[in-house]
Amino acid sequence: MTSRAIVRAYLGGREDSHGRVASWRVVYRQMAVDFEPHELWSEAARLDRHAFYARVREAGEPVPQTDPNSGQRFWVLARHADVHAGLRHPDLGHEVRRHQSDPAPARVLVSEAERLDSRQLICLDPPDHTRLRGFINTAFTARTVARLETRIEALIDGLLADARQRGTVDGVADLGHPVPVGVIADLVGIPAEDRERFRGWSRAMISGGRAWAVASEQFAAYLDDLAAKRRADPQDDLLSALVALQIAGDSLDRDELVAMIQLLLVAGQETSVDLIANGILALLSNPDQWQLLKDDPSRAAAAVEEIIRYDGPVEIAPPRYTFRGIELGGGAIPPFEIVALSLLGANRDPEVFTDPDVFDITRSDAKHHVGFGHGIHFCLGAPLARLQGRIMFEKLAQQLPDLRLLAEPDQLRGVNPRLTALPLAV
């Protein structure tokens, strides 16, 4: 999960008297592959997610799992064809209340942070999603991303020069984090003197809990002031474009503007950090592939696609509800239940990818990955993530050819699949 909005989309729904989502009563059929009800949360599944999703693919039907914390059931799919179909399915979406004849009372959003979160694109369906996506697509263009290339190159050059001086670095803290935060700050138009506060808010909004709410509200107040300045004195940045943009007489209201920038900040940072860190680990754990990249750094763009396929940042797409009973993935899923589409599982499907568990930056089928999603919720930051990744891996191969891991790969990940540290020698 990449933001508070995704977490609420996952946990929201019809609640019983204990605050748990009430589910339809369904008899679990005996599957060809047996699963424990909470297996996705087990230590074995967390230590080897790919093995778990391989079993889900083998099951041949949606696999029911129950969150041990909320008591909520959802249905996991991991075959490429099923995930691809689910990401475009007209009866799967986020705003389930719109489709219930007798919905539970709407939850009162008591804080500004919660209200802003509810307006993020990843929580919305058409027509609201279509309208807001139109604004960001108009302002956040390929030309906008291309203008950032020189800035990204300078930022990465500086990080790698510092790494050479130091001799050892952390691939997460010293290479992963500084790039997306700095780039998004440039994209939005955060003044240089405010960058440290911007980074602090970013870290807090990812952390969740009380820190998330405080940071969200502080950032919203800051953005209100900055947006007013951009209306009076527009600059060449995304915030200026969004505050000035009108489409058929329509414009973004205050909450929509803040929610959009927050989503870019939170989702754009976390996934890009993981792309860089996971990529460094994959390359250095496979010396033949690292050598291929060093011999020909122009392979960096292809390497990015293989990294996303092999070990992408997003395990499960923001969960969707069934708006009615549907047939998907070889089985029936009742109405108003959650469907978890595993991007990680789809990207290792042997029906689509040759030797899917092999990391190969020369493979021709990597382009079929669904690491950025598919359909109307396809990641709006995909071009920027690809650009940052390409430049980072190209420059690593050129400038730090002797880079090596200072820990065994299997020591770097535990039950938390996200890399929190990646010790490297230059």
Image (tube, helix red, strand yellow):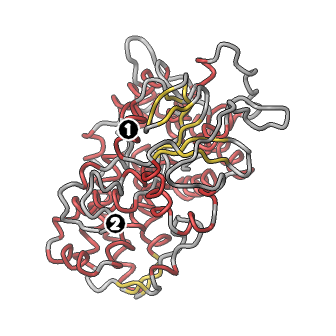
Residue at the image point whose x is 26% and y is 70% from the top: 395
Seen in the picture, residue 307 relative to 328 is either above or below; the reply is below
- Residue at the spot 42% in from the left edge and 25% down from the top edge: 244
Residue found at x 37% / y 46% = 372
Q: Residue at x 61, y 32 (%)?
A: 337
Mark closest to the chain's N terminus, 1 or 2: 2
Q: Is residue 328 left or right of residue 391?
A: right
Q: Is residue 86 left or right of residue 209?
A: left
Q: CA distance from mark 1 to mark 2?
A: 25 Å
Q: Is residue 223 above or below residue 164?
A: above
Q: Name the residue tied to disc 1.
A: 378
**Disc 1 secondary structure class:** loop
Nearest the eye: 265 or 418: 418
Label 2: few (<14), some (14–19) or many (≥20) C-alpha neighbours in 10 Å:
some
- Across and down, in percent, residue 26 comes to 65, 34
**In the image, which is nearer the foreground, mark 1 or mark 2?**
2
Q: Is residue 78 left or right of residue 158?
A: right
Q: Nearer the viewer, residue 140 or 320?
A: 320
- Is disc 1 surrounded by few (<14), some (14 to 19) or many (20+) residues within 10 Å? some
* Above or below 425: residue 154: above
Can the viewer see residue 381 in this picture? yes
Residue on which disc 2 sits: 357
Q: Assign a secondary structure to mark 2.
A: loop
